Image: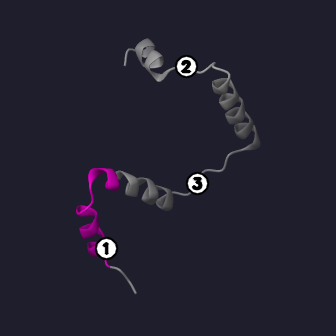
């Protein structure tokens, strides 16, 4: 059974802002293909998580302040 886009759009109009945000996350992942991570990038990501776990992370607020944001 085909569902008309208009029916889906009407349902979206009935959602709360929080529900629309959740739906956006789901639809965004469906609409855009996922990026493949190279082995080098995966290693860098793991290293970054290890640094954060070791307390070497930088707070976003500190970066924003340094950049004048």
Residue 52 at x, y = what percent? 63, 25
Q: Which secondary structure lies at badge 2?
A: loop
Mark 3 vs mark 2: which is more N-terminal?
3
Residue 47 at x, y = what percent? 71, 30
Q: Nearer the viewer, mark 2 or mark 1?
A: 2
Mark number for residue 5?
A: 1
Q: Is residue 19 magenta?
A: yes
Q: Which residues are magenta?
A: 4-20
Q: Nearer the viewer, mark 3 or mark 2?
A: 2
Image marks 3 and 2: residues in contact by CB distance under 8 Å? no
Count residues near mark 3 (Cα–Cα under 10 Å), then give few for <14, some for 14-19, many for 20+.
few
Q: Is residue 28 magenta?
A: no
Image marks 3 and 1: residues in contact by CB distance under 8 Å? no
Q: What is the CA distance from the residue labelled 3 to the residue labelled 2?
A: 27 Å
Vertical position of residue 49 compared to residue 17: above or below? above
Image marks 2 and 1: residues in contact by CB distance under 8 Å? no
Residue depicted at x 38% and y 84%: 2
In the image: residue 32, left or right of residue 42: left
Disc 2 designates what residue?
A: 58
Vertical position of residue 13 compared to residue 39: above or below? below
């Amino acid at each position: 059974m085909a569902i008309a886009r208009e029916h889906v759009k009407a349902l979206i109009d009935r959602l709360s802002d929080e529900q629309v945000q959740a739906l956006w996350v789901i639809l965004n992942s469906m609409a855009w293909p996922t990026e493949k991570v190279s082995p080098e990038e995966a290693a860098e990501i793991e290293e970054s998580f290890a640094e954060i776990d070791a307390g070497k992370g930088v707070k976003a607020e500190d970066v924003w302040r340094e950049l004048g944001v």
